[in-house]
Amino acid sequence: MRTLLFSAGALVSLTLAAQPARDPSIAIQTPVIALLHARVVDGLGHPPRENQSIIIRDGRIAAAGPDAEVIVPADATVRDLAGKTVLPGLVLVHEHLYYSVFAPHAPFHLNEMEYSFPRLYLACGITSMRTGGSIEPYADLQIKRRIDAGQVPGPKLHLTAPYLEGKPAAVAQIDAVDSPEDAARMVNYWADEGFTSFKVYMHLPVAELKAVIAAAHQRHLQVTGHLGAVSYRTAAESGIDNLEHGFFAMSDLNPGWKDNDQPNSIASQKAFAEMNPDSPAVAGLIQLLVDKHVAVTSTLAILETFGPECRIMSTAELETLSAPARENYLSSWAAVHARKRGSEAAAWAKLLELELRFFRAGGLLVAGTDPTGYGGVVAGYGSWRTIELLVSAGLTPVEAIRVATSNGARLLGIDRETGSIVVGKAADLVVVAGNPAAEIADLRKTELVFKDGVAFDSRKLFDSVKASVGIE
C-alpha cells in the first residue's frame, strides 16, 4: 500500500489547477457596468429609443432610460455605445447541439457539436435556447451542467428529450415507441433525467401523441412537434403546446389525407402551391391555433436550404466547417441548387404568407434555427438568417426581433427573467455595431453578448471554432 503525502502548498496548487481559467472570450466581468449613449430595442415591439443608458449590477439590469436620467455609478466599468444598438439576448426555441454528417455509402448520421455549437450560438447573441430533440441526451445534460457551472461558454439551455417517434424511424439514432403506454413511459423516464420538453416526430400516431401530451402536462412540461402523421388541427385539439417549422409540416390540406396516414412531402408541397391563403379552411386553422394558444416556430433558415432560393453559406459560415464537412456541404448544395424547381417557389411564398398571417392574427410566433438537413445551416449564423427571413415574410425588423426575444421567452415561461430590456431582469443583452431596427442584417455586426452581466467578445468566440464544425 502506498501513502501519498501532500504539503499545504501542494494542495493549494492542485486546487488552483483544478479551477477553470477565465475564458479568453470574456470581455467584461465586473460587478457594475454602464452602457451609455446607445440605441435600445427592448424586445417588446416598441420603437427603438435613442440616447439611452443601461446600468448592470451583479448580473441584472439595475437601471435603464435616457442618458440624462440615468446616474452612472462611480465604480462602473463604462462603455460608450454611441451609434450602436442594444437589444435583448435572443431566445430561440428549435436548436440542436448536433450537426448532420455525410459520408459516401454510409447511413445518415448526426454528430454532437459539444464544443463549437454552444460557442457559435452565444457569439451570435443567443443567450437562452431550447433544443428541438436530442440525439445524445446525456451529452446534452453534461453540456448544460458545464455551461451552468461557468466552465464553458454557451447559452442558457432548456433541453428537449430524445425524439418521440413512430414507425418507421428514419434515423438510426432515433428509437420508435411501440404504444401509447411506451410513449408515456419515455416521457416520465426523460423527465426524471432532467429534460423539460418533449418533441413528437413525423410518424408518431394520434394515440401515442395524446399519451405524450397527457404524461408531459401531468408534470407541467411542454410538448412540441414536427408532425406528419397527425394534422395540425388534431394536435391543437389534443393540447400540443408548439408546432415546429411554421406550416411546412402541415398535412391538413392534402387531398384525401387523414390522421395516421404516412407523411407525404410531395403531396404537401403541391397542396401548398395550390392553396388559397384567403380560404375559410386556412383562416379557420389559424384561428384555432390562436384560440388554443398553440405557438408556431418559424425555422425558415433550414427550409430555405431546400427551397427555390437555396442560398449558399457565407465565407464566415464556411470557415466554421471542417474540411470534410465543407466538402460534403458544397457538393450537397450544388445538387440541390441544380434540381428542377416545379412548384417549390409557389409553395415557399405560401409558407411565408401563413407565418405572417398567424403573427398578424395574434398567434405566438417564435423562432428557431434547426441546424440539420444536409449541413446548410450552422448554429448562430443560421439563427441570424431565420430572423432575416422573418422580415422577408413581411414582419418589420422590430417585430422580428420581438419574435426572437420576448416571444421565445414567453413560450419557455422565462419572460419574467429574460427576453426584454426591463429593470430587474437578467442582463442578457446584445451590442450591435449598427441598427437592426432599420436593417435586420445588422445583427451580423454583433460585437458583445452579455449573459447574466458577463460580456463575451463575439469575434473571439468565432475565432475559437474555425474549422471545427463536423468533426467533434
Image: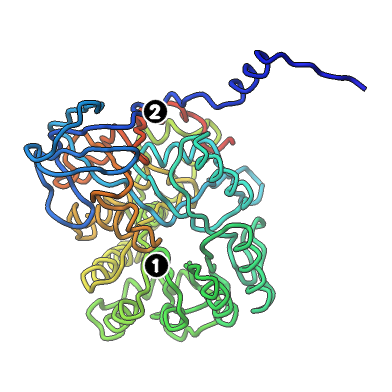
Picture quadrant where residue 281 is located: bottom left
Applied colour scheme: rainbow
Left or right: where 446 falls relative to 436: right
Percent position (x, y) of residue 159? Answer: 52, 55
Image quadrant in which the C terminus is located: top right
Residue at 24% x, 60% y: name it.
Answer: 393
Q: Is residue 154 left or right of residue 174?
A: left
Q: Label for residue 248?
A: 1
Q: Residue at x 42, y 69 (%)?
A: 243
Disc 2, SS: strand
Relative to 58, is 7 above or below?
A: above
18 is higher (above) or lower (below) than 100:
above
Q: Position of residue 135 (x, y in %)?
A: 60, 53
Residue 396, image quadrant: bottom left
- Name the residue that disc number 2 marks: 26
16 to the left or right of 426: right
Q: Nearer the viewer, residue 353 or 66?
A: 66
Quadrant that contains the N terminus? top right
Q: Residue furthest right?
A: 1
Which amino acid does the dot numbered 2 rest on? Ile
Spatial CA distance of label 2 from label 1 is 39 Å
Residue sitting at x 29%, y 51% = 387
| Disc 1 residue type (three-letter) | Phe
Q: x, y (%) of residue 392?
A: 23, 55
User: Residue 330 bears which disc, if any?
Assistant: none
Q: Earlier in the sequence, mark 2 or mark 1?
A: 2
Specify few, some or many for label 1: CA neighbours under 10 Å numbering under 14, 14-19, or 20 or more: many
Residue 462, relative to residue 355: is it above or below?
above
- Disc 1 secondary structure class: loop
